[in-house]
Amino acid sequence: MKSRFLAFKPSGTRVQVVEAGKGRDLLYLHGAGGHMPNDPLIAALATRYRVVAPLLPGYGQSTGEDGLRDMLDVTLHALDVLEALDLKKPIVVGHSMGGMIAAEMAAIARTEVTKLCLLAPAGLWLDDHPVADIFSKLPYELPGLLFHDGEAGGKLLTPGGNMDDPEFLKEFLVMNARRLGMAGKLLFPIPDRGLAQRLHRVSAKTLVVWGREDVLIPPVYGDAFKRAISKSKLVRIAKAGHAVGQEKPAAVLKAIKDFF
């Protein structure tokens, strides 16, 4: 994987872009946790596609988060990034918060996003099936919330690190605070920013993928997205939690290949 940077005027926003692989263009939008170290999903997708994965301001070395106030700002920012990248009819893939952003992009810019893959997207709220509050969780609780296999998930989240090490924990908390500060604008206290009223506008061919054991955003939300988007298909992946792409990267790659 390699990184490059985009600069935007007049805001001064600087966006870090991770790239890997060759082939058809695929734009990947990360979730609230950002890219995982040596991200298994990006690595899997790069075996078939040219993966272009920008980091949202507040993540990695991207800057400009103070200028993004709400969902509309973030969506327009993502569309500006898409335009600057000059990709050729990419498949737009978004996970969780990134799926929420990708869905908003497809609803607003219907001719720009024609192939869409949503991996356990955020953005809806069902009173009978509340979404877990990640902002109230301690670091050691995250693997069990994000992965079906919490032990393996913990190793993916903190490769070479140990949450019991005070120095590692301090570094993790500082990085996480910056990321969640940005994510909170979209997800806190609940991730309902009106997406339900706009999903009918999505005309892209859409694949919705959910882990059957997702405890962060229950799998019933997959049915809600499927009902709301006309040209959509729902695929459920067994023995996978919310981080379905990182936990079962080969299965997600196959679902994308088969659908598009």
Image (cartoon, rainbow, N blue to C red):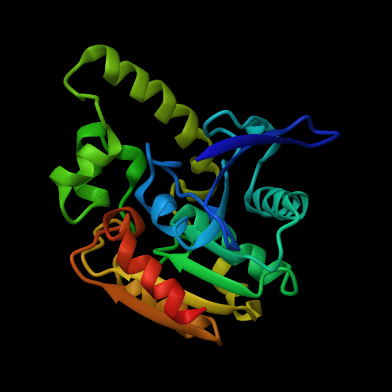
Asked if residue 139 lies left or right of residue 90, the reply is: left
Q: Can the viewer see residue 192 in this picture?
A: no
Instruction: Indicate the quadrant where residue 6 lies.
Output: top right
Across and down, in percent, residue 258 comes to: 43, 80
In the current view of this chain or complex, which residue is farthest to the right?
A: 10
- Residue under the image location 77 percent in, 49 percent down: 84
Q: Nearer the viewer, residue 51 or 229?
A: 51
Q: Position of residue 161 (x, y in %)?
A: 24, 24
Residue 64 sits in quarter: top right
Q: Give the percent coordinates (x, y) of residue 225.
A: 46, 76
The residue at the point 64 percent across, 47 percent down is 70
Q: In this figure, what is the number of numbered marks?
A: 0
Q: From where the camera sits, is residue 25 visible?
A: yes
Decide which of 46, 212 is in the foreground and name it.
46
Query: 143 left or right of 224?
Result: left
180 versus 110 height, above or below: above
In front of the other: 40 or 136: 40
* Residue 146 x/y as whole percent: 27, 50
Q: Residue at x 72, y 53 (%)?
A: 76
